[in-house]
Image (tube, grey):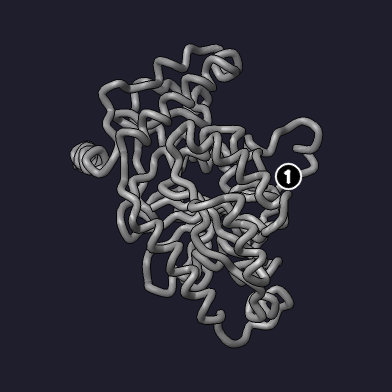
């Protein structure tokens, strides 16, 4: 099950992404955490030292190799160069299992106390003034487009801040989106933006109140977001200690209960592979018309395989084909 944490900068979405991923990992569930924020702080929030974080190989640094692997023997994709961030899988494409024995996971994953971290990478000097950060998110979108995950398997993505999350179809790649909102007018303004876009595409959305110091704060959020408010988090001495480099004690019981509420909300969602693939195709065609046809010099609408049905059955078929080819 895929979960995104979104919200304005400074709302605490990275901290909550890390807390939720750690909470899931405590039950020995397979958990992939992806840092898709331009600030790239998720690894540190999970407990990784800054020096060790530099050893994690960002997905964006090997995007060409990832494309080459994922396109497999798909006859609709002539080359990795013709593959863009929205290219959907089709027959012949290689599909991924969470933490499977594939080069995407083996090259880009770093284990942090049971949470497997992947990162998109930071802006480099070469990027400044000539590149958009969303180009680095292309590997994440391709990863999620080709991933076949199921119940009890989790992908937690710390998204880029604010309404920038809508700059690609990435926001439709999740089973549940948690919008982290502070009890302020600025805190709920992103919620209003996100709710309208999410509703248009049927994206399930729940609000997680953060930095809630009392009943007045909770009532403020309830007034502005209504039934979308799922749980609230207040100040945590444990979190503050970790932010200061002190790793002692355990997270407060009330916050552990709130994290479990998030898990229950995610687990209650049913996979809808048909809608997932339909939206992938829709955004691919949008991107093709807007810029990708021009950028590649090709008609990328031909990459869409109308007979491809995403999900576990497609994965089984791909595995059978791979086994037959190697025998």
Q: Secondary structure at mark 1?
A: loop
220 in relation to 298, above or below:
below
Residue furthest bottom in the image: 249
Front residue of 176/312: it is 176
Q: Quadrant of the C terminus?
A: top left
Residue at 52%, 33% in the rendered image:
169
Residue at 75%, 37% in the rendered image:
127
Other residues around mark 1 within 10 Å, as few (<14) / some (14–19) / many (≥20): some
The residue identified by callout 1 is: 123
Percent position (x, y) of residue 115?
48, 66
Front residue of 72/256: it is 256
* Among the 4 quarters of the image, the one containing residue 30: bottom left
Residue at 51%, 38% in the rendered image:
198
Is residue 65 visible in the rendered image? The answer is no
216 in relation to 281, above or below:
below
Percent position (x, y) of residue 235?
66, 74
Percent position (x, y) of residue 22?
50, 69
Residue at 43%, 74% in the rendered image:
26
Is residue 158 visible in the rendered image? The answer is yes
* Among the 4 quarters of the image, the one containing residue 325: top left
């Amino acid at each position: 099950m895929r979960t995104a944490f979104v919200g304005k900068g400074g709302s605490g979405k990275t901290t909550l992404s890390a807390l939720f991923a750690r909470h899931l990992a405590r039950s020995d569930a397979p958990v992939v955490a992806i840092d898709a924020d331009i600030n790239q702080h998720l690894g540190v929030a999970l407990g990784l030292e800054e020096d060790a974080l530099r050893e994690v190989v960002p997905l964006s640094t090997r995007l060409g190799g990832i494309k080459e692997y994922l396109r497999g023997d798909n006859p609709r994709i002539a080359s990795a160069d013709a593959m863009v961030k929205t290219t959907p899988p089709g027959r012949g494409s290689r599909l991924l299992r969470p933490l499977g024995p594939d080069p995407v996971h083996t090259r880009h994953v770093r284990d942090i106390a049971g949470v497997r971290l992947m990162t998109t990478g930071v802006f480099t000097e070469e990027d400044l003034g000539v590149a958009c950060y969303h180009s680095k998110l292309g590997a994440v979108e391709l990863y999620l487009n080709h991933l076949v995950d199921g119940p009890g398997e989790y992908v937690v993505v710390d998204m880029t801040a604010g309404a920038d999350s809508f700059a690609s179809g990435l926001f439709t790649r999740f089973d549940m989106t948690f919008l982290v909102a502070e009890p302020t007018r600025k805190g709920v303004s992103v919620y209003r933006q996100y709710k309208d876009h999410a509703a248009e595409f049927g994206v399930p959305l729940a609000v997680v109140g953060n930095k809630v110091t009392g009943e007045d704060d909770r009532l403020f959020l309830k007034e502005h977001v209504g039934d979308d408010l799922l749980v609230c988090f207040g100040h945590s001495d444990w979190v503050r200690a970790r932010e200061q480099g002190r790793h002692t004690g355990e997270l407060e019981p009330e916050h552990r209960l709130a994290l479990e509420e998030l898990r229950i909300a995610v687990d209650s969602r049913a996979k809808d592979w048909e809608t997932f693939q339909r939206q992938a195709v829709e955004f691919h065609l949008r991107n093709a018309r807007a810029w990708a046809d021009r950028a590649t010099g090709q008609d990328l609408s031909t990459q869409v395989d109308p007979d491809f049905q995403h999900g576990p059955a497609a994965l089984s078929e791909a595995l059978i084909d791979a086994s037959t080819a190697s025998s």
